[in-house]
Image: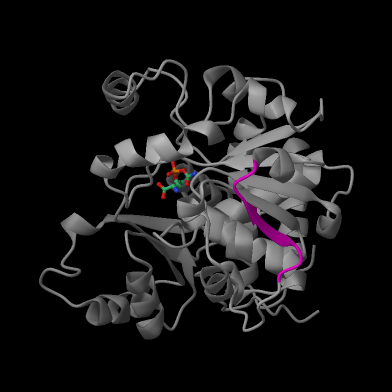
Amino acid sequence: MKNSLYKKSLLSLKDINKNEIKKILLLSKKLKYLKKINKQKSFLNGKKIVSIFELNSTRTRCAFEISAFDQKINITNLDVKNTHMGEKESIEDTIKIFNCMYDAIQYRGPSHKIIKEIKKYSTIPVWNALTDKYHPIQILSDLLTISEYSKYKENFSKINLAYIGDCKNNIANTILEASNILDIKINMISNKKFLPSKKEINYIINSKKNKHTKIFCTEDKEKGLKNIDFIYTDTWLSMNQNFRELDKKIKLLKKYQVNKNLLEKTKNQDIKILHCMPAIHDEKTELSKKIFKKFNIKNGLEITDDVFNSKNSLIFEQVKNKIYVIQAIMILSLKKSVIF
Ligand code: CP
Ligand code: NVA
């Protein structure tokens, strides 16, 4: 069977179609199962990838390293500060060097423009591990989690998802892309300042039509949470965002915090909670201590600690799934034909 993902890059979900997403999820599930029964398979013996993190990462970076290990890939982890890239050598020259040495490039950085430039000069697949605009690996992992916990399985057009909080960040953008490709019903819930405009939605999903029957933006929590199966939220302070703007943001987003009260509005005992993490849910980090003190916050910012740790939370299931999705992406973009 022809593998249409072979040699493909993944900068955003727009780079792949519905069948390709389904194929990634199917292979991820298979890999997860094989690992569970201790019959792991390596498809990429001897391949080499270079992994560049210009921004901090825990989950994605660890998942890349574990995936590389499981697939017997050699991985070079580069901290840009320790290379010549951007300082003494252009992105163009750096990528041309990588083309001579590696089979693929993984990149996380502060600007989507940079990864686009990397792709421009790359003759090998480029995988986006987060930019200011998109986080496709995260949302593919989350789709896997959703399909595992929904009675509709991979029948995504039946799923009702609400994304609440900062609806203008990389996670929200990628959820919009997923909704468009897989026909998922998505309610974006926030203050209007943090909701995408029709124009922004058209740009994100690459559509000229002004009609997205399945994307609904609202400031009204009751409306937005009706008949919802999954609630997704993300930090109100993304890596590219300014701490100084948090004050205004908290005032506008306070009522959109994911807490017990908000869950009750769904009238769904079985409501599932998603968060890509890092989350500001307790006072155990330097950043959260600073935020709690400065803004007189007692119990979490975008999500409360009790909900974060509740039985409804799938947050640590999301973490596990990244390993398999990354491996599936690696295999499908580096192997001409894959039989699984
Ligand atoms: N969710 C996510 O991408 O986590 P990291 O920043 O830890 O990689
Ligand atoms: N929106 C968050 C996602 C972290 C995985 C950020 O960009 O920091």
- Seen from the viewer's position, the closer of residues 95 and 204 is 204
| Residue at the (47%, 24%) spot, across then down | 281
The C terminus: image quadrant: bottom right
Looking at the rendered structure, the number of numbered marks drawn on it comes to 0
Q: Does residue 71 appear to the left or right of 246 in the view shown? A: right
**Which corner quadrant holds the N terminus?**
bottom right
Residue ID at (65%, 48%)? 142
Residue closest to the far left: 88
Location of residue 256 by image quarter: top right
Vertical order, 97 against 257 (above or below): below
Q: Residue at x 70, y 45 (%)?
A: 224
**In the depicted structure, whether residue 155 falls above or below residue 125:** above
**Residue 152, image x and y in percent?**
88, 48
| Residue 173 picture location, percent across and down | 54, 60
Quick check: can you spot residue 215? yes
Q: Is residue 35 magenta?
A: no
Left or right? Give the position of 296 relative to 94: right
The boundaries of the magenta stretch are 212-220
* Res 35 seen here: no
Q: Position of residue 277 (x, y in %)?
A: 49, 37
At a point 75% along the width and 37% down the height, the residue shown is 36
Which of the colour schemes (rainbow, by chain, secondary structure, one colour) is used? one colour
Residue 17: where, in percent of width, then height?
Answer: 70, 74
